[in-house]
Image (cartoon, helix red, strand yellow):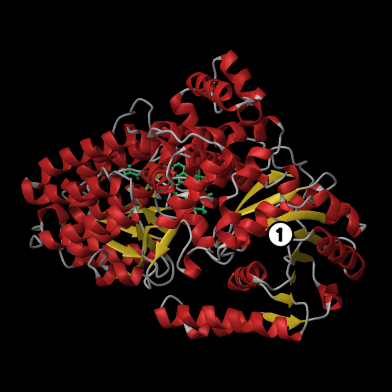
């Protein structure tokens, strides 16, 4: 038998138990073991039914992603599934944990399905850019109807056991021990002489072209640029165009094409990278996370409130400390209002909100932070103020209490010194809105204790974030790379590219919005303040491109005043702003600049290559340990389109030699100050390698 599938016979019932940690993926030995179990069941006249279940914490969570792109080891999953479908004795899937992708397809090909109550089912293939390839798009509509099938296969979200039962995807919910329940279920089938049944023999539900069209439109908007969701709709349609077996053959072809395509490669790269960044490469083995069960947040502005919400939402008590009573009250009102709107929308229950609110203790006295084990500082982004807060925190909290700054640009090493306990100090840089955005840049400062690093990486995950470790530098990973894009965007405007064209180029590359629409949304006053804070390190040309300051001086602050780069109507719909054109023309005139027509290609390359080059510098300086940190941070922090795999993966696809040649050309045109290639990039090109290999 196989080393991952145990076969046993108990009376008239055979059992195949898959044990292939960590997630019981259908690796080659599992497929072989299942095929063998079916053969033995069919061959032995004393066996009347077969139960398929899994050891460990979950039923099969899908095909084995690590086998993709390698030569197929027989039998393929569709072959095993066909054997199940055609078996002459009933096969019962007894499932628990997460029944995903190929695992869901195995279950659907079994003749009966029972599940523990907390089981979750789903087709996450779409998140990996893949069309399900083992019958998922054909059996699901036949069992659950068209609307449910479209939703499950194209959106990738889970359905719980109760939902699966209501939708006809499972037959029963089992209580107690799953193995025993499955045995009892199989005995009942045998007693009632219920034989095998195949979902493939059910008719397709009535066709509904409107449903397909609506899905197509929603997916084109929500998953803009991604090919898999639309291909999955095509795959479902096969059920109407040909018979079941032919549809399965075509579905498998679509699946294989999708796996071989660049989008799936990029999305699978991100899946692996996300897990990789959780493992900090150079942490000593004895650096264990400190226990954290009481967290403090000091500073209750927009960021502080979001952080309080994130912590309480994860079920952890939080001491929220504001400047004075009125600040604290305003913060709590803000938090309560945001959660109330979630209740109104139906995304949260009042009970859940009450639970979260009960976890928040408020105070205007930093001494109340004495009992916490970790404090996140989110006061005004001002060096003197933050240093004073760190000096206070150093005195008022116990040695060993971790002091984390949420600063975006200030030097954490300086804050660490101010605290008098540098080894306990680090950064935890959340993104706005902090209770929503998944990315968390954890920052290791010069003297941060490795235990502190281990603690904030673990804590980040516990509060539902995606923590990425960065070293100390101006802007860390995301904002430092973004600042190069902003610089190029302003320069391009000075040279003659319209803001609307620049936005369009980034939008069609796949970003959710361009830099100018983003500036209007964030507020140009906010951007002007950020530019002012960094003016000391800016070049003359960067200072000269002062469009934001010009607009602020005219009272044009973006969406909130109805005018910025664009004009906005009451519904905040943007249209071109003649004042912007006039401002750019006058600016050129004033500084004697000649405006030229700039191609979309140049715009795209200047904006994106400037970021990749900066990414290479981050790697060379060791601010980011690996390219994975950068790809994960940019996709989750800036909205770099996930189906490109992030800037570093994308750059590898272009070829670093080509990239370097363009950078050298921009250097000749624009000057060394902006386009000196990262030494690491030049080194990689000389060695003929990419960022990854
Ligand atoms: N194949 C191989 N390894 C996998 C894997 C898979 N499908 N899923 C997870 N792992 C590894 C993962 O890399 C990590 O390893 C470890 O398991 C624990 O994962 C024919 C074509 C199941 C909900 O997309 O959603 O089926 O990094 O850290 O939080 O139509 O993993 O520790 O070395 O995520 O408990 C469809 C993807 C495949 C499921 C568990 N299936 N996995 O979450 O742990 S395509 C998926 C998950 C397919 C068919 C098609 C989650 C999880 P390491 P983890 P977790």
Q: Is residue 416 left or right of residue 177?
A: right
Residue 599 pos. (x, y %): 38, 32
Looking at the image, which is closer to me, 688 or 477? 477
Disc 1 crowd rating (10 Å Cα; few below 14, some 14-19, many 20+) is many
Disc 1: which residue? 406
Q: Is residue 211 left or right of residue 613?
A: left
Task: Answer yes or no: is residue 398 visible.
Answer: no
Residue 529 pos. (x, y %): 66, 58
Q: Is residue 332 left or right of residue 127?
A: right
State the quadrant of the C terminus: top right
Residue 176 sits in quarter = bottom left
Residue at the location (66% across, 55% down)? 530
Residue 146 sits in quarter = bottom left
Task: Answer yes or no: is residue 42 visible.
Answer: yes
Residue at the location (44% across, 36% down)? 604
Residue at the location (65% across, 79% down)? 331
Residue 198 pos. (x, y %): 15, 54
């Amino acid at each position: 038998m196989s080393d991952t599938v145990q076969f046993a016979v108990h009376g008239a019932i055979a059992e195949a138990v898959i044990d292939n940690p960590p997630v019981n993926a259908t690796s080659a030995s599992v497929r072989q073991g299942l095929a063998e179990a079916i053969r033995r069941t069919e061959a032995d006249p004393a066996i009347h039914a077969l139960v398929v279940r899994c050891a460990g914490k979950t039923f099969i969570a899908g095909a084995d992603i690590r086998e993709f792109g390698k030569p197929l080891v027989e039998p393929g999953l569709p072959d095993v599934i066909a054997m199940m479908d055609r078996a002459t004795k009933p096969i019962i899937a007894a499932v628990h944990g997460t029944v995903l992708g190929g695992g869901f397809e195995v279950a659907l090909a079994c003749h009966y399905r029972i599940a523990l109550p907390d089981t979750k089912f789903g087709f996450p293939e779409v998140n990996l850019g893949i069309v399900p390839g083992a019958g998922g798009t054909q059996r699901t509509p036949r069992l659950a109807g068209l609307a449910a099938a479209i939703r499950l296969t194209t959106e990738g979200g889970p359905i719980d056991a109760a939902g699966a039962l209501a939708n006809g995807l499972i037959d029963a919910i089992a209580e107690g021990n799953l193995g025993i329940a499955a045995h009892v279920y199989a005995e009942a089938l045998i007693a009632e002489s219920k034989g095998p049944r195949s979902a493939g023999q059910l008719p397709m539900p009535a066709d509904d072209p409107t449903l397909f069209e609506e899905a197509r439109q929603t997916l084109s908007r929500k998953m803009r640029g991604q090919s898999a969701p639309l291909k999955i709709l095509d795959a479902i349609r096969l059920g109407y165009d040909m018979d079941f077996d032919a549809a399965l053959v075509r579905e498998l072809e679509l699946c294989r094409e999708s796996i071989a395509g660049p989008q799936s490669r990029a999305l699978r790269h991100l899946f692996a990278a996300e897990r990789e960044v959780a493992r900090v490469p150079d942490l000593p083995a004895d650096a264990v996370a400190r226990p954290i069960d009481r967290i403090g947040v000091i500073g209750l502005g927009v960021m502080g409130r979001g952080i309080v919400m994130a912590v309480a939402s994860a079920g952890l008590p939080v001491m929220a400390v504001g400047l004075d009573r009125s600040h604290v009250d305003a913060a709590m009102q803000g938090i309560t209002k945001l959660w109330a709107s979630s209740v109104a929308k139906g995304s949260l229950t009042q009970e859940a909100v009450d639970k979260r609110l009960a976890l928040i203790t408020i105070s205007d006295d930093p001494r109340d932070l004495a009992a916490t084990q970790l404090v996140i500082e989110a006061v005004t982004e001002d060096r003197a103020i933050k240093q004073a807060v760190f000096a206070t925190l150093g005195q008022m909290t116990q040695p060993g209490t971790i002091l984390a700054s949420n600063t975006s640009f200030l030097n954490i090493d300086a804050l660490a010194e101010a605290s008098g306990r540098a080894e306990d100090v680090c950064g935890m840089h959340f993104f706005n809105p902090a209770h929503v955005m998944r990315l968390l840049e954890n920052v290791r400062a010069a003297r941060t204790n490795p235990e502190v690093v281990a603690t904030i990486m673990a804590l980040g995950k516990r509060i539902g974030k995606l923590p990425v470790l960065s070293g100390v530098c101006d802007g860390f990973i995301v904002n430092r790379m973004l600042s190069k894009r902003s610089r190029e965007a302003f320069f391009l405007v000075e040279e003659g590219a319209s803001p609307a064209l620049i936005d369009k180029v980034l939008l069609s590359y796949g970003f959710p919005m361009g830099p100018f629409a983003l500036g209007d949304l964030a507020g140009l006053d906010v951007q002007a303040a950020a530019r002012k804070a960094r003016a000391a390190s800016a070049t003359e040309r960067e200072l000269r491109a002062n469009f934001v300051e010009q607009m602020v001086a005219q009272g044009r602050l973006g969406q909130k005043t109805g005018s910025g780069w664009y004009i906005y109507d009451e519904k905040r719909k943007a249209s071109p702003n003649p004042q912007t054109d006039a401002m750019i023309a006058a600016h050129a005139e004033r500084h004697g600049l000649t405006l030229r027509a700039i191609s979309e290609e140049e715009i795209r390359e200047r904006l994106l290559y400037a970021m990749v080059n900066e990414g290479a510098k981050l790697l060379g300086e060791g601010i980011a340990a690996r390219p994975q940190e950068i790809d994960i941070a940019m996709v989750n922090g800036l909205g770099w389109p996930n189906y490109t795999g992030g800037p570093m993966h994308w750059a590898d696809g272009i070829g670093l030699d080509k990239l370097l040649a363009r950078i050298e050309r921009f250097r000749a045109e624009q000057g060394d100050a902006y386009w000196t290639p990262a030494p690491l990039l030049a080194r990689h090109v000389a060695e003929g390698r990419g960022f990854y290999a």
